Structure formats: C-alpha cells, structure tokens
C-alpha cells in the first residue's frame, strides 16, 4: 500500500513496534481442557477466562446442538425486528433470578452491554466517577456517552465521597467500577460505594465480568461475596468467562432495563445472538447451581497455586478471584519470562504498560476448575525455573 494512507499506517505500526507494544495473535490449534496446542505444540493453559471449564462441558455442547437443530444457526435480525427468539425471555428471566434483580437484558457481548448501558443512562451534563483501573469497555462507554468523566484513584471510596460532597444538588452521578478488576484480581470496595450511592442519590454500576459464576457462596458474584443487597445496583456481567460461551447482560431495577430496551443502540442496531448461544447461556446458569463442587475445585486450585508460587518466593497481588497476578516489575523481564514460559510449555501472558502502571508489569495467571494438582505443580515449577534462568528470581 502506497500514498498518504500507506505512509500513515506504517508510521502507526512502527511506533507501536518501537514502544514494544506490537501485538501478535497466537494460533490455538487444539483444545483438550486446560491442555491445548499452540501452533502445533502442547502447552498448559493458564490464561483462559474459562474458569469453570464450561467451554468443554458435555451438557452445554448438547444444549448448543439441540438449539441449532430446533431453531437454526442464526437469529436472522435484530431483537427489535424478528430476531427476538423466545429463548431470550427464558434467558433473561434466568439471569434476573440468578442475580436476584427485578429484571435483566442480554446483549451480544459484555463490551456491548457496557456501551449500551452507559450511553443510555448518562449524557452531556451528567457526571461519571470512574475507577482508574476500569476495563477498556467502560472507558469507551464513558467516552461514547459524552458525560463528564472523572477518573478516581483505584478502589478509593474516600476519593469518591470527596467528589460527591462537592456536587451540586440534583446533578445525576454514576459511580462506575469493575467489581473484580481484570488485571489485579482485587474486588472493588462495593459496600462503601453502595452506601455512598445511597447517601448521595448516585447510581452504582458494577461490571462483574470476572466475579459472575466464581465468587459468592452460590456463584452469584461480587455482591454475594461481600454480602451486599443487589437492590438498586446495576450489574453488568458476561457469559463469555466463567459461563463458557458468549454474550453480555445487564441486571438491575426494572425501570433501568425498560430504559435500555428503548435506548441502548448496541442492543437493537446489531443482530440478535444465535439460538445455540442463548440456550447454552441459560443451561450454564443452571449448572452453576447444579454443580457447586466445580466452583469449590476452582477455589481449591487458586489456593494451591497461590501457596506454591509464594513458597518459591514470587510476589503475588492478593484477591479472592481466579486471577493470580505475579508481580515482576519492569516490562522487559516480564515479557521475556512469558516468552520463555510459552517455549517451555506454559501459556500465561505478561501484562505491561499501558495496561498496568510502569514498574508493575506482571504475569497474569488464570486458574481453572479443571486444572489438576499436577497441572498446578507443573505451572509453579516452570515459572520458578524460568524466573531463575532469567534472574527474575534469586
Ligand atoms: C471481559 C470483560 C468485559 C467484556 O466482556 P465480553 O463479553 O468479553 O465482551 C467487560 N468488562 C470486564 C471487566 C471484562 O473483564
């Protein structure tokens, strides 16, 4: 490609390479639970959000096959036209029951749920207080809404309280936070934020992509984990992580769901989900209740992995979720370590700036219920020996 566009695009890509931020897709050539093949070589998977192993669950494969057989492979139109298959109503009833909310609405992805939700709720003149470590989809949602957005220090209810005290009466404010932070694995101070929201008539919106199906005695997510009543709180979730498929949802007060049905452009200017996905998602929510032992195995695995990594002297960031960040420090060594691990058979990514602050680069391990104690021991051994070879660890 030549000319103005060719030059421009090559410039952008070269800048990306110079900053060591070039992205490359790795081709997964086979999947057998947490043992996968990458470009033809076997590796142990510690980078998937498929926390419960549900992408390979026989009951969910069965649900997908049956729905495709009965309803076909696609929905054919947006939900406002003829794509609103009855499977949606069943699924949304199930989401509301699962999350203990008045109502729920399903979107094509969690990303689209966030865009549709925030842009429907707020606009110019409104204010969003948004946690500094919020997911990219929330950041983009704030921009799309054109509301004034103030980025709050991470997990700092006092900073939110100080902002709220300054706000003139009657101004609409949204408190916006990941419930489980996707790179740090910590849980937001949701009780404090809910209290602030109540006191100042602000609306609390939480994105529980990594908590749903994982946290809480019954897998309901971060609110259950912290013992918080979901009434009045808007929860975003995804079917694409612990639930093993694809799709996003908003669960909360009926009035807000009704607003979204009327306003959320990502909901109705995009084609409805295929029947197989809707059926799988509904079945997956039921499985969370039917198979609590899968969630217990996940947490036992998290405990095992954390104990093993600590024992060899690595620094971990704390948190109750299935995300285990191993702090390395500089970006160079973190990237080198992840590369060395992939070559030696362990697939876990390095996370570096701008995704995390400078000096806080890390390996991000994601634990699955279907990891065996042997998988976990192998991961610890591989990380410890690679870290010693690269002198990241004494
Ligand atoms: C993954 C993720 C999303 C996006 O969900 P998808 O269903 O994959 O689009 C949104 N928010 C957070 C916090 C996430 O981790």
Image (cartoon, rainbow, N blue to C red):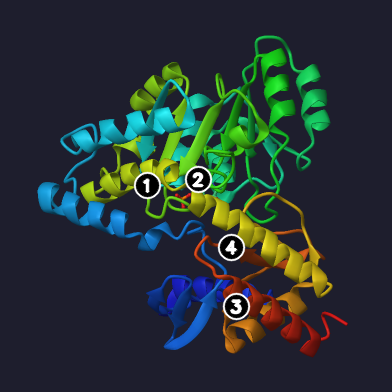
Quadrant showing the C terminus = bottom right
Residue at the front extreme, as displayed = 293
Mark 1: few, some, or many residues within 10 Å (few <14, many ≥20)? many
Residue 163, x across and y down, in percent = 78, 25
Mark 1 falls on what kind of element? helix
Give me the C-alpha separation between circle 4 and circle 2: 13 Å
Q: Are marks 3 and 4 in contact (CB under 8 Å)?
A: no
Left/right of residue 329 with respect to residue 196 in the rendered view: right
Tag in front: 1 or 3: 1
Q: Which mark is residue 327?
A: none
Q: Which residue is mark 2?
A: 213
State the residue in front, 53 or 254: 53
Tag in front: 3 or 2: 2
Mark 2 falls on what kind of element? loop
Dividing the picture into quadrants, the one containing residue 328 is bottom right
Vertical order, 202 against 176 (above or below)? above
Task: Note whether ligand 1 is within 8 Å of mark 2.
Answer: no
Mark 2: few, some, or many residues within 10 Å (few <14, many ≥20)? many
Give me the C-alpha separation between circle 4 and circle 1: 19 Å
């Amino acid at each position: 490609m030549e000319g103005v566009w060719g030059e421009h695009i090559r410039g952008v890509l070269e800048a990306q390479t110079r900053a060591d931020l070039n992205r490359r897709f790795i081709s997964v050539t086979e999947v057998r639970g947490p043992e996968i093949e990458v470009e033809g070589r076997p590796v142990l998977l510690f980078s998937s959000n498929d926390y419960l192993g549900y992408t390979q669950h026989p009951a969910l494969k069965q649900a997908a096959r049956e729905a495709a057989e009965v309803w076909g492979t696609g929905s054919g139109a947006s939900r406002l036209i003829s794509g609103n298959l009855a499977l949606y109503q069943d699924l949304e009833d199930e989401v509301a029951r699962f999350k203990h909310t008045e109502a729920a609405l399903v979107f094509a992805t969690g990303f689209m749920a966030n865009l549709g939700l925030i842009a429907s709720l707020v606009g110019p003149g409104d204010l969003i207080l948004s946690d500094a470590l919020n997911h990219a989809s929330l950041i983009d949602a704030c921009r799309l809404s054109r509301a004034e957005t103030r980025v709050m220090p991470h997990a700092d209810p006092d900073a939110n309280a100080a902002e709220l005290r300054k706000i003139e009466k009657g101004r609409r404010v949204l408190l916006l936070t990941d419930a489980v932070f996707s790179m740090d694995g910590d849980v937001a101070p949701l009780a404090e934020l809910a209290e602030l929201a109540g006191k100042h008539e602000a609306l609390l919106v939480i994105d529980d992509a990594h908590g749903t199906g994982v946290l809480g005695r019954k897998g309901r997510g971060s609110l259950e984990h912290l013992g918080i009543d979901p009434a009045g709180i808007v929860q975003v979730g995804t079917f694409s992580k612990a639930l093993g498929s694809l799709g996003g949802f908003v669960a909360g007060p009926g009035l807000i769901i009704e607003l979204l049905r009327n306003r959320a452009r990502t909901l109705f200017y995009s084609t409805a989900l295929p029947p197989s996905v809707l059926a799988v998602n509904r079945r997956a929510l039921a499985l969370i209740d039917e198979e609590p032992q899968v969630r217990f195995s996940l947490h036992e695995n998290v405990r095992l992995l954390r104990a093993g990594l600590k024992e060899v002297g690595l620094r971990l960031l704390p948190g109750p979720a299935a995300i285990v960040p191993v702090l390395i420090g500089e970006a160079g060594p973190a990237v080198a370590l992840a590369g060395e691990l992939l070559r030696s058979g362990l697939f876990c990514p390095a996370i570096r700036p701008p995704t995390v602050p400078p000096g806080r680069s890390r390996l991000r391990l994601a634990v699955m219920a279907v990891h065996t104690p042997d998988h976990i021991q192998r991961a610890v051994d591989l990380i410890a020996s690679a870290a010693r070879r690269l002198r990241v660890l004494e």
